[in-house]
Every structure is written in C-alpha cells, then in structure tokens.
C-alpha cells in the first residue's frame, strides 16, 4: 500500500502473512521522505498503521463516509485535560506562525500538494483532507491559532489521534514555509 499524505512524505506498507513464519509488516520510505525529520515520518507511519489495525479489529466500521458538514473546534469536543495535547501540537510553533506572511502560507500549501488555503479579512486558514472521512481546518490570525475537525471525524477519532495528525500537518506547513522564506526560523531551533 502506498501512502502519500503530503509532499515529500511517501511511504509503502508491505504486509505479508506466511503460513510458516506468521505475519510481517514492513514500512518503507521513499528517498524523498528523507527531507522530513525522522520523528515526523515515523509518527505518521505509526498512526496510520494503528488506524489500519483498528479497522482490522473492527473498532471502526468500514463505511462509505466523507467528512462531516460542520467544523467542530477541538476545544469544544475534547475531553477535560486535553489542553496539554493541544499545547504540544502548537507550543513553540505559534511563535513561528506569528512571523509567517499569508502569502508565504499560500505558496507553502501549494508546495505540499495537499490542502487548500483561504485568506480572510483578519486571519488565514488551511484545510487539509487527512483521511477519506476526516478533515482538519487550521486558522491563524491576531487572536492566535484555532484547530477544528469535521463533525464526522471529530466524533469518530480520539483526541490524541487528531492532535497527532494536527502536529504533523502543522510541522509540514512550517517546513514548507521555511522553504519559501528562508528568513523564518527552523523548527529544530525550538525543539
């Protein structure tokens, strides 16, 4: 199975079930994925395999469903105590986001080959289709960051899974912004 969530991440999952040796899952990364920090590529593969396992165990039913029609803010549906998860997903990234011009974000989103950019009067937003039935909207403006998920995905997936994807896509966006405007600080400087 080939999975390419956003440029340049591309991975291949090879599952084999041998009667003599049992099951084996191997994860291979395309050479171009080396441009992404190992942790990000690894976390994406881990989350995706965990998701497949949940479908395999029947935790999630296979259904033909797209993202829900409404956006739900993470703070509106997350369980009490989920604030630290959100802080980890944003954290120092907000310091970099404050320095990024909307024009740079627009080009960065195009470079990711995934998502759509929409400038508004007092903020900008990016919407990413994460899975067939899950979408993520990230807004940033003078009032800070706002993370929202579609109503279907927000009900279906756990907050830790949603925040993991948010973290990965925000990192990907900031990496591409740095490629467009090299005056921006590197993410690695903060971690």
Image: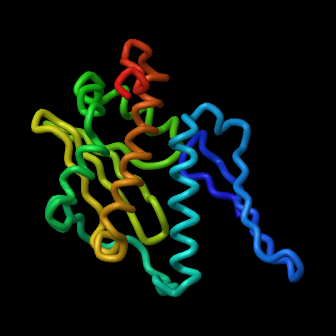
Query: What is the residue that sits farthest to the top in this orientation?
Result: 183
Residue drawn at (32%, 73%), measured in percent from left and top? 68
Instruction: Please provide percent x and percent y for residue 119.
Output: 26, 39
Question: Looking at the image, is 22 positioned above or below residue 120?
Answer: below
In-image side of 178 versus 90 (left or right): right
Residue drawn at (49%, 69%), measured in percent from left and top? 132
Instruction: Please provide percent x and percent y for residue 44.
Output: 53, 52
Instruction: Please provide percent x and percent y for residue 41.
Output: 57, 45
Front residue of 74 and 120: 74
Question: Looking at the image, is 120 positioned above or below residue 98?
Answer: below
Question: Looking at the image, is 178 positioned above or below residue 166?
Answer: above
Query: What is the residue that sits farthest to the front in this orientation?
Result: 21
Residue drawn at (24%, 69%), measured in percent from left and top? 70
Query: What is the residue that sits farthest to the left in this orientation?
Result: 143
Quarter of the rendering occupied by the C terminus: top left
Instruction: Please provide percent x and percent y for residue 131.
Output: 48, 65
Front residue of 190 and 117: 190
Question: Looking at the image, is 81 positioned above or below residue 57?
Answer: above
Residue drawn at (71%, 64%), measured in percent from left and top? 1
In-image side of 54 versus 105 (left or right): right
In-image side of 42 versus 80 (left or right): right
């Amino acid at each position: 199975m080939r999975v390419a969530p956003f440029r340049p991440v591309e991975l291949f999952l090879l599952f084999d079930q041998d009667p003599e040796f049992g099951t084996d899952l191997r994860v291979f990364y395309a050479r171009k994925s080396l441009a992404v920090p190992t942790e990000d590529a690894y976390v994406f593969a881990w989350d995706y395999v965990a998701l497949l396992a949940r479908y395999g165990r029947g935790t999630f039913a296979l259904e033909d469903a797209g993202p829900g029609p409404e956006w739900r803010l993470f703070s509106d549906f997350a369980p009490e105590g989920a604030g630290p998860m959100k802080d980890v997903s944003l954290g120092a990234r907000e310091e970099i986001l404050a320095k990024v011009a909307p024009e740079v974000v627009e080009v960065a989103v195009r470079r990711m080959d995934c998502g759509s950019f929409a400038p508004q009067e007092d903020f900008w937003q990016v919407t990413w289709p994460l899975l067939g039935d899950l979408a993520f909207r990230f807004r940033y403006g003078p009032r800070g960051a706002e993370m929202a998920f579609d109503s279907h995905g927000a009900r279906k997936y756990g907050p830790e899974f949603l925040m993991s994807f948010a973290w990965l896509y925000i990192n990907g966006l900031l990496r591409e912004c740095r490629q467009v405007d090299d005056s921006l600080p590197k993410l690695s400087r903060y971690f």
